[in-house]
């Protein structure tokens, strides 16, 4: 454990804490020794309530209760709505639960795992969406979410990003009192994430909305209040009182909740505003030539550049712009037009879509890559932060998306190579796992003086990891242009000006925050061409 656990922590310093004393009575407990939930998120018409915390902490349980599907038992045998009303009398949730008890609350939900939708629905996008259109606003949703060109496609043929937007449209199209979005960002690029956030804010004008989201920049811009969720995954979960959005995220990053007097992490997650490193300090790993790659309907043009030893490069751009194609060419998985890439360094590559082609226990699989798996260095630097130890005996084919992602990140870093390329490592990870993965990759590059390249849409991950950026521009699914590596500020300026959004730095934690469109700062920064942050 991490040494500060009150309860024995089986999760190796990821989840901590002793329960605050006032939390002796749960809202709900599954069976005698089952998972216990303490506290519930507040839902209120006219606002977006965000939940910030890891998976397995009781969020779906909360929604089961708030939607009236399950009567909470307060840790006892069986609950009743009378007991719930008594418990919440005099609070802001009383009125809400009165309606739940009467059966007059209608709920619309966007499930977490959109990959399951094609298994449950066979048919075209249009059919799925027309079935859910209870408000007569389908055209508006299709337009806002950019779905018009996929209306006549089979649901089973959609990409992850398309499926996600269809699922969000289906949830939004229903006529409900309470909307629950269990993650909006998976498979979406930043532009799409922002579009969806704006849509959800519109819904919340006269409805209650609850959102679980692991991309902190998006949670930050989307929510009106945030509950932090903490505890021990599968053991118990605590939902705090609602906090101001900025305060909740800052407290979470610092790892300490002062009102609750609870530590959720032994240390803080830090954003450094790192100055560019002096050129002479680091040697050049490799210079690469520009190349092009043409597919049937898509062409990529990449400018050449040089990569430095020990640096982490972020790769950013919209979906369908050629990022994965670019890294596949560097990794030697694809040939550029005109033949082989002249690139004599070894590369360890984690693809965007991880597929299991052998069925082995995790530990056996990693040992097969390198014997360093059994060293204490490996345990401390890779296995522990990626929570591998409790996966070691599991079979690769039995892992969930988030578990497989962590194993794939570990496998990539376990190989000996000159350069490490990770395509979308944040996918399927919850907020805590993202911060641990970020730290693992960064420390690995620093300690081993290795070059790493990370493609991701999570701005916090990119900001924390990267010293330089490779920015992609163009027209998604038609052509893409990869620029040479450039400094963070310059690169982010280019990237964000294409998106027409500006970021400022939080004065307390230095984390990037999206400026409200047309706010004073937004306009000032745009007028100065300072999209990333303004100093
Ligand atoms: P989250 O949505 O935050 O991932 P859930 O609310 O789905 O978490 O689950 C929290 C914990 O409660 C899980 O560890 C799970 O084992 C347990 N749990 C969920 N549903 C049931 C159930 N019907 N019976 C017993 N345990 C359950
Ligand atoms: P990104 O990683 O930026 O989302 P990709 O590099 O995966 O983008 O894809 C860029 C474009 O190239 C997409 O329109 C995609 O459909 C197309 N594409 C990717 N791989 C192939 C391929 N093997 N054959 C034909 N088209 C492809
Ligand atoms: Mg990609």
Image (tube, rainbow, N blue to C red):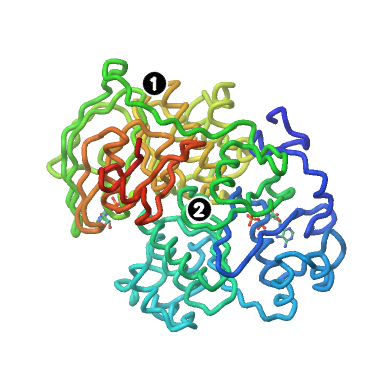
Q: Is residue 165 left or right of residue 323?
A: right
Percent x, y for residue 528?
26, 43
Callout 1: SS: loop
Q: Residue furthest right?
A: 77
Q: Residue furthest front?
A: 520
Q: Residue at x 79, y 54 (%)?
A: 34
Q: Is residue 7 visible?
A: yes
Percent x, y for residue 167?
47, 68
Percent x, y for residue 117?
49, 68
Q: Which residue is mark 2?
A: 219
Q: CA distance from mark 1 to mark 2?
A: 34 Å
Judge whether 21 appears above or below 312 on screen: below
Percent x, y for residue 341?
19, 35
Q: Is residue 157 left or right of residue 358?
A: left
Label annotation for residue 138: none
Label annotation for residue 449: 1
Callout 2: SS: helix
Q: Quadrant of the N terminus?
A: top right
Residue 373 or residue 78, whichever sits in front: 78
Residue 436 or residue 522, whichever sits in front: 522
Residue 347 or residue 135, whichever sits in front: 135
């Amino acid at each position: 454990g991490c040494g500060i656990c009150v309860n024995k922590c089986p999760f190796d310093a990821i989840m901590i804490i002793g329960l605050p004393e006032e939390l002796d009575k749960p809202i709900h407990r599954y069976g005698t020794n089952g998972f216990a939930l303490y506290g519930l998120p507040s839902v209120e018409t006219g606002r977006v309530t965000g939940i910030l915390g890891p998976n397995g902490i009781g969020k779906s349980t909360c929604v089961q209760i708030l939607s009236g599907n399950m009567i909470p038992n307060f840790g006892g045998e069986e609950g009743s709505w009378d007991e719930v009303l008594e418990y919440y009398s005099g609070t802001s949730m009383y009125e809400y639960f009165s309606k739940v008890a009467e059966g007059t609350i209608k709920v619309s939900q966007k499930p977490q795992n959109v990959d399951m939708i094609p298994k449950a629905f066979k048919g075209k996008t249009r059919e799925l969406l027309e079935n859910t259109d209870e408000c007569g606003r389908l055209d508006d949703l299709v337009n806002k979410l950019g779905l018009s060109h996929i209306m006549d496609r089979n649901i089973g043929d959609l990409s992850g990003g398309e499926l996600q937007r269809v699922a969000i449209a289906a949830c939004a199209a229903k006529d409900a009192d309470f909307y629950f979005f269990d993650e909006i960002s998976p498979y979406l690029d930043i532009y799409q994430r922002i579009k969806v956030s704006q849509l959800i804010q519109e819904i919340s004008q006269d409805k209650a909305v609850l959102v679980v989201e692991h991309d902190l920049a998006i949670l930050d811009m989307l929510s009106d209040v945030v509950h932090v969720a903490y505890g021990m995954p599968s053991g118990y979960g605590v939902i705090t009182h609602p906090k101001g959005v900025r305060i909740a995220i800052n407290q979470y990053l610092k790892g300490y909740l002062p009102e609750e007097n609870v530590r959720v992490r032994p240390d803080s997650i830090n954003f450094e505003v790192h100055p560019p490193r002096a050129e002479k300090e680091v040697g050049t790993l490799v210079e690469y030539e520009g190349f092009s790659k043409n597919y049937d309907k898509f062409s990529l043009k990449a400018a050449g550049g040089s990569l430095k030893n020990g640096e982490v490069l972020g790769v950013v751009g919209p979906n369908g712009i050629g990022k994965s194609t670019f890294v596949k060419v560097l990794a030697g998985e694809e040939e550029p037009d005109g033949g082989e890439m002249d690139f004599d360094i070894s590369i360890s590559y984690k693809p965007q879509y991880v597929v299991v082609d052998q069925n082995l226990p995790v530990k056996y699989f990693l040992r097969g890559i390198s014997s360093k798996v059994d060293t204490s260095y490996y345990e401390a630097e890779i296995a522990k932060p990626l929570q591998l130890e409790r996966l070691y005996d599991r079979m690769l084919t039995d892992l969930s998306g988030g578990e497989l992602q962590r194993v794939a990140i570990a496998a990539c870093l376990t190989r000996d190579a000159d350069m490490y390329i990770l395509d979308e490592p944040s996918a399927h990870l919850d907020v805590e796992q993202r911060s641990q993965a970020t730290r693992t990759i960064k420390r690995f590059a620093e300690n081993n003086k290795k070059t790493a390249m990370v493609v991701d849409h999570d701005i916090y991950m990119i900001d924390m990891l990267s010293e330089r950026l490779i920015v992609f521009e163009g027209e998604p699914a038609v052509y893409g242009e990869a620029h040479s590596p450039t400094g963070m500020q310059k690169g982010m300026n280019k990237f964000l000006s294409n998106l027409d959004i500006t970021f400022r730095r939080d004065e307390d934690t230095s984390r990037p925050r999206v400026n409200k469109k047309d706010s004073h700062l937004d306009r000032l920064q745009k007028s100065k061409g300072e999209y990333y942050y303004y100093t």
